[in-house]
Image: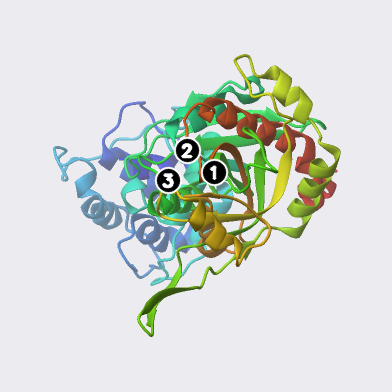
Amino acid sequence: MLRLAEIVDELGVEIGSSTLSPYDLAGAIIRGTPGRKFSELIAIVLGEGPIQPRLRRDLLSDEKRLRELCQDADPESDPTEESEFNGDGPSSTAAHQVTKKTWQAAAQMGPGQHDVPSEMIGKKQETSSGVKKTMQKEFGVTDVVIVCALHKPELEKVKFAGGAKWEPLPAHYTDPHSYFRTTYTTKKGSKLNVVASAPTQMGLSASAVLATKMILRFQPKLVAMVGIAAGASGDKQGYGNILAADTTFDYGSGKVMDNKGVVEFQPDPMPLPIDARLKSRLKIWESHRTELDEIYESWPAEKPQTVLNLHVGSLGSGASVIDDPQVVSDIMTHWRKLIGIEMEAYAVHRACHDTVSPEPKFLCLKSICDFAHKKADSWQHYAAYTAAEFCYRFLTQEWENLFPDETQQGD
């Protein structure tokens, strides 16, 4: 029934009643379709394969054929029932409307051409392209997706940062995860649509799955990983300090081998660098300490008596929680400028790199809640806050610098 309503609405066919059976609508389509294209048009829209066009239209036989094609639309209707038309009523308004351009493209197809845009086939036959168009229609283009490893305190603080008002997205029947959306306003007045989520458990695999789904579903320009991590050096770093990865790597990737009775690990970390423009802007914020004092002062609870700093460098990801300084020391033999370790960033970065082309930019901001040799939970909420607040301020102040071509085209 929905398909027929779409066709009637697109053709502008006038019908005499607001409540009609599928067969009334079928008759209206037959009478309202011009020229020789009507049989091909019906076949294409209904996905039933080619029907040879006729030079002369036999209204009764063609309407019968269309009824047969549409029997599953309303099984309780009588397929032999005669349709009635008076031509005086207003056009029907379909619940789901195809665009003029899409309809015209379909009308130009010949028999046997079935690569029809998904919105003309129905929700059950929607392709991934159709899902994308549906999401954009409902929620607009998504500029940023934020992936957190934990609902608390990480995602909780993301939704608190900047005073933004978040709302849950409606549940989707193909996706068990929950998502939240908001709009950031940049310093230059641009509106950024932002979607955030967290997996049901920590770790590389769970974060990779979630990030991949969000990239495919929302098609963002930038993916941000925001949360907490372990610092690499208690002498040079403090609690709450923000770690911005310019390179991510998997410190657990490699080969374990027996070398003359000694077990050795040969690392193969497969590092990924971030976008050069993004790194350049982060380095400026690092050197100028932009916004850091304000972020520190804005935390309403107890805070450490240390200066809040930003560290840009290499961030290692692994499958395990590390509570051994020797592990960090071993990693630093290969990564001299290591700034921290955690369990998800490389997986999200890899999802950005491998899922679609062109790939979205990847921004990772994780603040220090402890050190590998000194595990504690005392500063988790503070660290999650500094990372989330920095992410909000960085994106709203730097968006036009990160995507200058888009800004110039908009001008």
The secondary structure type at the circle numbered 1 is strand
Q: Which residue is mark 3?
A: 7
Residue 256: give its label: none
Q: Is residue 327 visible?
A: yes
Q: Which residue is mark 2?
A: 375
Image spot of residue 395 (x, y percent): 71, 38
Image spot of residue 6 (x, y percent): 42, 42
CA distance for labels 3 and 2: 64 Å
Q: Which residue is mark 1?
A: 230
Please name the residue shown 74% across and 30% down the image. Answer: 307
Q: Nearer the viewer, mark 3 or mark 2?
A: 2
Please name the residue shown 81% across and 34% down the image. Answer: 290
Q: Amino acid at mark 1?
A: Ala
Q: Earlier in the sequence, mark 1 or mark 2?
A: 1
The secondary structure type at the circle numbered 2 is loop
Furthest-bottom residue in view?
260
The secondary structure type at the circle numbered 3 is helix
CA distance for labels 3 and 1: 59 Å
